[in-house]
Image (cartoon, grey):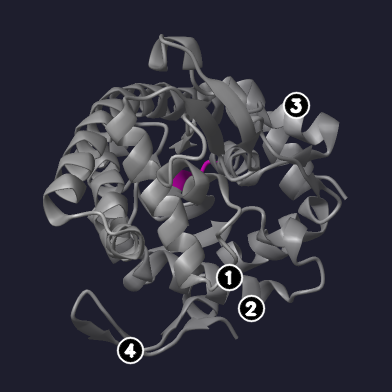
Amino acid sequence: MFAIGVGTVFGLKEERIAHEDKYPHWIRLAHKMAPKLRKFTYSFDNPLDNLDFDTLFPEGYKIVGCTFTGIVYVEIEAPKNVEKYAALLKLGNALEANDPYYNSEAYRFLKGDIQEYPVCLSIFTGNHKNDLKLPEETIKSCSGDCDDFATLITAGINGLGEVGCFVSIPGHAVAAVTEDHPNSLQDLKGKVLSSNGLILGSSEYVHHKDTPVPQILEEVNEKFLVSSTNALVTTERVFCRQDLKKSLEWYGNLYVKLQEGRAKAAADLLGVNEEELADWREEYCRFYGNILKKLSGKLKENEMEYLKTVREYISDEEQQKVARDYLFTQA
């Protein structure tokens, strides 16, 4: 039996909610689609496609690496004090990890042995409409990521005449089914808590091919209930956190704040006085803050285009039919 366990969510103690007792149909749908999804492989998007780096860094840049989680590492030229503070951060990280630092580029720059230090920024590229596949394309390629699988499942649920929801949570996207259309992000939480909705998941069936379906359902529902929700897309509406742009800037500023101790440790090692350190930090924060403002504005714009594309795909009747037939009606 699938149930969400007892826990405190949003300050309310919830009793066990046995979805299988009340909604066996939804459980059967999950069981039906699971073997189809387990035939798929997971593929990653190219984060370099998500941003126009020429516009973001008009004075020049060099991409030195990227991750499949959407982080791009970019080296840029910066004012000398910004270089100094960036080098302090790097040296401070080495000190904290007890790594050798005497031959490091950061240490040699701060000691004056080399004259330039490339500032390397970690740039989060966010979501982009180009990352999404049509459900029929996901089926044809037999591969995708969580966004693609969530879109496929949601379209299929809609094709059955039920209410499918595409849900974006930090670092992940999942599909959900509800008795009626949610009217807000919080309303979807309430529907899941009151057993009027069920998170079906997405890439969990690809990553955990041998995990029983009830266990997957329990885990994805519990994760959803304790996570913040970035966005919700149905055929009727797109709901998005209004503070998303501000939160991106806030996280960037928090990153700088958390690194202050490391910079201070490196400054103490080198004998940098408090006034000089404050000047370096102020210029670094101003420089980094200007980049964050430009970046967060573009990420917000990309996010809205991405969510509109999701809605277009899950609302398309032909895509609904293709997804429905593949996931729920074919043997």
What is the magenta range? 161-167
In the picture, the disc for residue 281 is none
Cα separation between marks 2 and 4: 18 Å
Residue position marked by numbered label 4 in the rendering: 15
First-in-chain label (2 vs 4): 4
Which residue is identified by label 1? 217
Give the mark nearest the N terminus, 1 or 4: 4
User: What amino acid is at disc 3?
Assistant: Glu
Please, what secondary structure does the residue beneath circle 1 have?
Answer: helix
Per the model, the C-alpha gap separating discs 3 and 1 is: 26 Å
Closer to the camera, 280 or 304? 280
Query: x, y percentage for residue 84?
Result: 35, 40
Residue 215, label in figure: 2
Q: Closer to the camera, 41 or 270?
A: 270
In the drawing, does residue 229 fall left or right of residue 141? left
Image quadrant in which the N terminus is located: bottom right
**Under tag 2, what secondary structure?**
helix
Q: Is residue 150 above or below residue 1?
A: above
